[in-house]
Image (cartoon, rainbow, N blue to C red):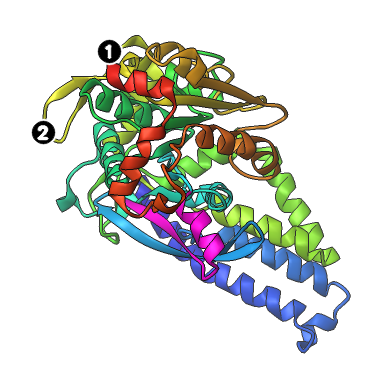
């Protein structure tokens, strides 16, 4: 019922938002008589703020048409490599007619970025993707809005997330011989589970895993987000935040944790910060500060765009990650695509290097939560593990913005490169040819060769 009421309110507000946008333009257009008023600039700014507070925010585009690679502009083409009911594996294919640049691109590592499914779209990692594209072949998990997935597609569970990640890893391995995995925030847990299961079966595991700001062990330095999940019962979440999708959407009838409730929770964490940001935006509009207003729009176009999560996935994440701590306690069983249960054993990972990244001021995943990956992955030798604490960085700062680009990315790039096999010969570096990529593993680091044999 609450979901239906929200949608009704949103529909009623839509014409008022459109009116506010029109009024803002009337007061700011120099050809309009209304713009001649002494208060015109303030009126225009006020209506603009009202429009942005009332408008509906749809899924943003990644909008990465080009990147700069060593001073050369390289074109980017997005394509969907695999289309699953609840997720698209999206590739950012790079093109160049400069032969030297093309040779450089072909020799770079392939990276699967596992994006969060925790309220926002994968486009929240736009800056992460754009930066990584300079030195890597980039794929990302682009999760779908559950309210748009018909009931005929079935339910989506945390186990399905783990199985998706395994399938995507195998897909990249089939193309390049192997790949690297990078997970940001919530997916550090299912990504680690996916690789653990592959290791336990004796499958080829990724060359490296980079885990950034995730709740591997949510018991350490619990934040407000952790405390809510820990202090409320499973039944409380099921009874208070789970609703059915209204009839107006393709996923009508699906049980979800609605995006608008998640957004309310995001804002409630720092209401004064958001209020100040909107007031600053109002002031920038009056002053004509185009740079400041555009920065505000870009941030909130992304921040305000939220998606619904399938209720099964959401509730199981609460239970497994924040209430039972199943990963670190060694009690997590995942159902595979064949229907069989398998125990998640991170200690079975031996041939995948581990890099954990935490923000000093992270208020979502507290200090030590991500670093805990090193203690539970006891099969990985110490020389193949690394932890990096980003001074002065909050949660978003470790994967977006200046600190990400200047402090974190150089470390991530160096770690991945140090665990990327070297081609046997200069003429053999053709990453789009699987056989040649597989042959390149002959020159992988000696420590990994030993570990792979053990596995």
Residue 53, image x, y percentages: 60, 57
Quarter of the figure with residue 291: bottom right
For label 2, the residue is 338
Q: Quadrant of residue 50?
A: bottom right
Count residues near mark 2 (Cα–Cα under 10 Å), then give few for <14, some for 14-19, many for 20+: few
Q: Which residue is mark 1?
A: 331
> How far across and down, in percent of the image, does residue 170 sit?
27, 41
- Viewer-proximal residue among 357 and 69: 69
Element type where label 1 sits in the image: loop
Which quarter of the rendering shows the C terminus?
Answer: top left
Give the class, few, some or many, for how many residues have Cα within 10 Å of label 1's Cα (few <14, many ≥20).
some
Residue depicted at 55% across the width and 39% down the height: 266
Percent position of residue 225, x then y: 51, 26
- Residue shown at 68% from the left, 55% from the top: 296
Residue range (magenta): 88-107
**Left or right, residue 153 beside residue 414:** left
Instruction: Classify 392 as above or below 246.
Output: above
Alpha carbon separation for disc pair 2 and 1: 20 Å
Q: Are marks 2 and 1 in contact (CB under 8 Å)?
A: no
Point 72% across, 29% down: residue: 392
């Amino acid at each position: 019922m609450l979901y239906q009421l929200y949608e009704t309110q949103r529909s009623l507000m839509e014409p008022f938002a459109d009116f506010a946008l029109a009024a803002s333009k009337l007061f700011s257009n120099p050809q309009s008589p209304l713009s001649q008023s002494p208060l015109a600039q303030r009126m225009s700014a006020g209506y603009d703020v009202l429009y942005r507070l009332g408008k509906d925010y749809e899924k943003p585009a990644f909008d990465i048409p080009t990147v700069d690679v060593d001073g050369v502009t390289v074109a980017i083409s997005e394509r969907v490599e695999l289309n699953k009911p609840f997720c698209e594996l999206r590739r950012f294919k790079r093109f160049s007619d400069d032969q030297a640049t093309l040779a450089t691109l072909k020799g770079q590592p392939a990276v699967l970025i596992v994006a969060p499914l925790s309220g926002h779209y994968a486009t929240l990692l736009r800056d992460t993707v754009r930066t990584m594209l300079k030195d890597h072949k980039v794929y990302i998990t682009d999760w779908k809005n559950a309210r748009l997935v018909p009931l005929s597609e079935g339910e989506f569970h945390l186990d399905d997330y783990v199985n998706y990640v395994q399938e995507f890893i195998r897909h990249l391995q089939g193309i390049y011989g192997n790949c690297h995995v990078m997970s940001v925030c919530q997916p550090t847990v299912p990504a680690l589970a996916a690789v653990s299961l592959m290791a336990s079966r004796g499958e080829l595991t990724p060359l490296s895993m980079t885990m950034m700001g995730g709740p591997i062990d949510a018991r350490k330095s619990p934040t407000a987000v952790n405390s809510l999940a820990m202090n409320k019962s499973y039944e409380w979440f099921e009874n208070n935040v789970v609703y059915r999708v209204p009839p107006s959407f393709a996923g009508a009838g699906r049980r979800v944790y609605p995006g608008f409730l998640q957004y309310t929770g995001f804002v409630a964490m720092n209401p004064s910060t958001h209020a100040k940001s909107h007031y600053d935006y109002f002031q920038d509009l009056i002053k004509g500060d185009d740079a400041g207003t555009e920065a505000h729009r870009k941030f909130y176009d992304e921040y305000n765009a939220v998606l619904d999560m399938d209720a099964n996935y959401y509730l199981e994440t609460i239970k497994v990650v924040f209430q039972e701590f199943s990963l670190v306690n060694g009690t997590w069983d995942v159902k595979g695509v064949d229907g069989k249960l398998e125990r998640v054993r991170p200690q079975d990972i031996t041939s995948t290097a581990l890099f954990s990244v935490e923000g000093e001021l992270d208020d979502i995943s507290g200090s030590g939560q991500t670093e805990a990956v090193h203690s539970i992955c006891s099969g990985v030798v110490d020389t193949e593990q690394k932890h990096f604490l980003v001074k002065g960085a909050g949660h978003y700062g470790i994967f977006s913005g200046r600190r990400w680009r200047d402090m974190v990315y150089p470390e991530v790039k160096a770690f991945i490169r140090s665990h990327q096999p070297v081609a046997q010969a200069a003429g053999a570096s053709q990453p789009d040819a699987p056989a040649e990529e597989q042959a390149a593993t002959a020159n992988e680091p000696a420590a990994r060769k030993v570990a792979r044999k053990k596995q």
